[in-house]
Amino acid sequence: MTESIIAATDGSPTAMAAVKWAADDAARRGLPLRIVHVVDRWPYGIGAFPPPDWAGLVAHAGERVLAEAVRAATKHRPDVPVTTELIDGSPARVLRDQAGPATELVIGSRGLGGFVGALLGSTVLPVAGHAPGIVVVVKAGADDQQDAPRGEIVVGVDDSPQCEPALAYAFEQARLRGCALRAVHAWQLPVHAFAPEISYDMDEIRQAQHKLVKDRLGAWREKFPEVEVVEDVQSAHPVQALTDASTRADLVVVGSRGMGALGSVLLGSVSRGVLHHAHCPVAVVRS
């Protein structure tokens, strides 16, 4: 299958921001853009008395949504080839399937059906938690940020195997954009409820944390010598550190733990927290 960037749309403002973000990344990579709209023809399963010509009406509405997304993408990036696809099924399930063969899947943080005040739509966590590969979540207003790049990619660094795919994607994004990469490693001392008198050699701990980051980044620095890397090692909660860094970033990249049966467990608490609170698009990368 030909490599492509896939953007999902439902006609919402966040979906339109996702389409534009995807068009920008397709242009950077020299790849085509495929825009998909998922038609959940009867989401509540009450099929006994559907409205007249329900299937045709829903399909026609979906085609309008796709046409609007194509107009926005081609106006934003006229040089990017764009195709569309209307797909029947459950949005979360369909988008997880679409993410597998794609270079990356780009979705909005909230759709038209989101509750007022909700930070994330109901589809985001199941897709980001289960989909293989790369899922980029874009919030409303992200298209304004695209017009004024901040010039930095942020990636979360730890000692887990899931960090490697995230680093690969983050370094590639920094290279494509010609910007700096900020590698954020946040650590906290363990709290021993039954032994509060335990003391630590703080200098030794700090040195160990800095060595962890240097060791983790070493091979990637050799592979991407043109990327300026900023090592940001701090004693803080990882979600807070990455959220703070997102205020000056164009993209935050996090790995996914890939464990557990539920989407919320699969995603991991740090990735989930960053998706909720980051001030810029977030890429969740699974191997």
Image: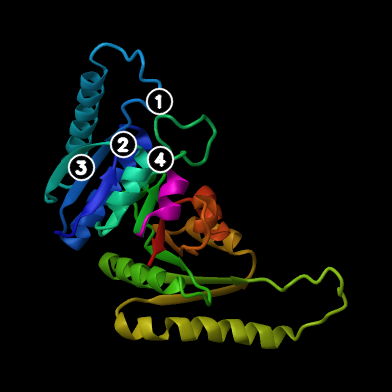
The relative height of residue 254 versus residue 122 in the rendered view (above or below) is below
Query: Element under label 4?
Result: loop
- Mark yes or no: residue 115 visible: yes
Check disc 2: other Cα within 10 Å, few if <14, some if 14-19, many if 20+.
some
Residue for point 47% across, 39% down: 122
Q: Which residue is mark 1?
A: 45
Q: CA distance from mark 2 to mark 1?
A: 12 Å
In-image side of 282 versus 210 (left or right): left
Q: Which residue is mark 2?
A: 89
Query: Element under label 2?
Result: loop
Q: Position of residue 194 (x, y in %)?
A: 87, 71
Sequence-wise, which precedes: disc 4 or disc 2? 2
Sequence-wise, which precedes: disc 1 or disc 4? 1
Q: Nearer the viewer, residue 214 or 198?
A: 198
**Closer to the eye: label 3 or 2:** 2
Type of the residue with mark 2: Gly
Check disc 1: other Cα within 10 Å, few if <14, some if 14-19, many if 20+.
few
Q: Which residue is mark 4?
A: 140
Q: Position of residue 176 (x, y in %)?
A: 26, 67
Q: CA distance from mark 3 to mark 2?
A: 24 Å
Residue for point 68% across, 71% down: 188
